[in-house]
Image (cartoon, coloured by chain):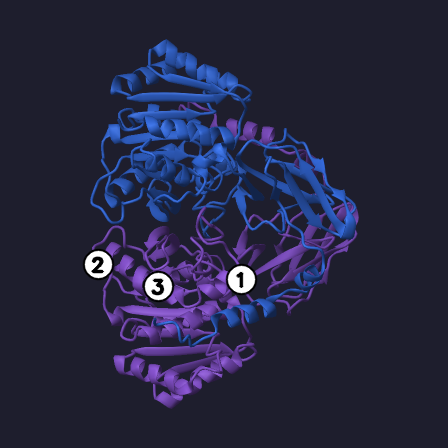
Chain colours: A purple, B blue
Amino acid sequence: MKFKNFTIGIAALLLMSTAINLQAQEISAMQAPKVVSPEIADDRSVTFRVLSESASSITMNGSWMGFGQTLPLTKGEQGVWSITIDPLESSMYHYNFFIDGVAAIDPTNPHALRDGIRYASLLMVPGEGSKLFEINDVPHGNLSHVWYNSPSLGIYRRMYVYTPPGYDSGNSSYPVLYLLHGGGGDEDAWTALGRANYILDNLIAQGKAKPMIIVMTNGNPWQTSTLMTVPGHPPVTRENYVKFQGQFEKSLVEDVVPYIEKNYRVKAEKNSRAIAGLSMGGGHTINASIAYPGTFGYIGVFSSGIFNQNEDKETLERKFVVLKESGVSKYWVACGVDDFVMDSNKRLLNVLDKTGLEHEYFENEGGHTWANWRTYLSMFAPMLFD
Amino acid sequence: MKFKNFTIGIAALLLMSTAINLQAQEISAMQAPKVVSPEIADDRSVTFRVLSESASSITMNGSWMGFGQTLPLTKGEQGVWSITIDPLESSMYHYNFFIDGVAAIDPTNPHALRDGIRYASLLMVPGEGSKLFEINDVPHGNLSHVWYNSPSLGIYRRMYVYTPPGYDSGNSSYPVLYLLHGGGGDEDAWTALGRANYILDNLIAQGKAKPMIIVMTNGNPWQTSTLMTVPGHPPVTRENYVKFQGQFEKSLVEDVVPYIEKNYRVKAEKNSRAIAGLSMGGGHTINASIAYPGTFGYIGVFSSGIFNQNEDKETLERKFVVLKESGVSKYWVACGVDDFVMDSNKRLLNVLDKTGLEHEYFENEGGHTWANWRTYLSMFAPMLFD
């Protein structure tokens, strides 16, 4: 055994290194009561804790709570604030503390995620409801941060590309799902919050979805990438949002699709291309599919719809007729019954009905939430590429 | 122009969506004074601000500060706490606030990074010193999160693989640098804190480094991945650290190298393989190179050395002689003059001297810091694969 006579005391070095790097706060924390947070009980009630001797108020907000609600933590012995909430359904949630009004992630929870320009702590309540997006002991696809040139926008941009298990070692060609995020998000959203890569790993392992590539772009066409603006590139402003309206769809179909079809082993034909998106990305999906009929054989619109009521209805309907005539294998629409986009969603359904574009509609509880979008992806992916 | 008659009011939807998702805290924040943080002045002094009406103490720690130091913010008008620090050298830094003692990232800074199990806000002070690791308008390589099977460890594991610009669209084969992190880090460290991908993008664009693949593994052999332990896999405990000692090097050479050489277009020979690591990863580098002589033609040891003084010196020296005889194109050692590992670093230099293994040594200011490790990578990469 080569490593029996081990030359370097790596464990010793780790200990040294850890000790030397300790901050003063950490040293005092070592003398302070041990704080565990979050702690999930067997009944799925959850206790959150945070240590502060001097705070005057600590509250929290969680993604399972109603809009704008907060719950107060109570100060106990030795400065440990805590709250125990009623049992949650097994699922994935995120939450923040507010320390004297300052938003913070849970300092003792190493799992955090980024939601646009904000960070939150991740809470996975394990059980039936979380199995589909947990990291299970199944083969995993890879997730690539891919930089590509966008001639339409005149900039380099970044997207995430999921390749299914077996892609690297095999020679097969795969179908592609273009999966679009909502307003405030970016190319990170569908994996950080949507768990799209793990959902597909699990569905593929169960034989419920075909192995596919997923392409997750940045729907904000003035940005090079997540939060990144390279010097000389357009800054992130409200004016640019309006100015670049419509440019994303063009760059998706004219830049991204050709890049993927050139550089990956894909089936480059309509019935091996799917497009889906949530909220703003659902709008992008509607736009791109009618602007480029015959490009996508599978179309999914999650929590979105038609927002511009002033649009010339005949022009709009004509576009949907052209899309219908191009041949659509599946047009799937999903929305939560409490979603604030319900009126717009209904306008989309009306146009689909009126133009005879065959579609399926799924309505469930809840509103404009990642819990719903993960559910929608897990329902839509198995419908693809028959 | 296809998008002139724009069907869906995406911008309107974005506004709606943003408005609906606002939390109560955010609404009150909109009525509160606008807080900008961090604000970098032309002279590179930096002002940090955070809003709290009720906090009794807010301090901060930054990576430019000495060990364990904090600076107090001062409460000003309308609950805005602030501090302005003296000009910093242009470089990349990270920092935390402590709100009544609770560690927090800066809530108004969208750029954060993970350092092991902690999060910090990123501060990029632009100028000469930051150019090498900023995201410049040059071609970017891709960064893949790659899952692979590790027969040595009996688990699936995750690593990051950087492929240089042009990899996807070309047919060339590339040399590979295996780049190892330190204690407390994982496969994320060399990109999040080390900016290895952007450093190589920039060096390659300037013609200073050859295009190469960089493989960044997880040096904690009981983990599947960053913070992730799949059910049934060994948990993260001190006991496992000791139990698995030495297993990382074996899995690197016997599992990772073959995986990379099978699945990537690489030059599979000694003088196209480099290994380098910082701190614990420097120890892994020393171990792996003497345990597998003839595998790596280029060896870089950053801020590390030989820690076990009880090791039988003759056995150790014999291993270095075998390594020397296997043919090493470059053995490069770097350490900061203030680094706490200096004694161990000197023991490594002594062994290299004594065994006549030709090497170069670079000593600079500072200690056990990412500022130094970014510098070392930017010096080492240009030496590779002549």
Q: Amino acid at mark 1?
A: Arg
Q: Nearer the viewer, residue A54 or B15?
A: B15
Asked which quadrant contains residue B268, the reply is top left
For mark 3, name the chain: A
Q: Position of residue A129 (x, y in %)?
A: 50, 67
Quickly name the residue at label 1.
Answer: A238
Q: Which image quarter holds the N terminus of chain A?
A: top left
Label pair 3/1, CB-CB below 8 angstroms: no
Q: Type of residue at label 2?
A: Ser
Q: Residue farthest to the top?
A: B354
Q: Give the Cα separation between the discs numbered 3 and 2.
A: 24 Å
For image coordinates 32% across by 69% down, the residue present is A274
Q: Chain of mark 2?
A: A
Q: Which mark is residue B81?
A: none
Give the labeled residue for mark 2: A172
A345 on left or right of A290: right
Q: Examine the rendering and report whether any part of residue A138 can be seen.
A: no
Chain assignment, label 1: A
Find residue A252 and name its label. 3
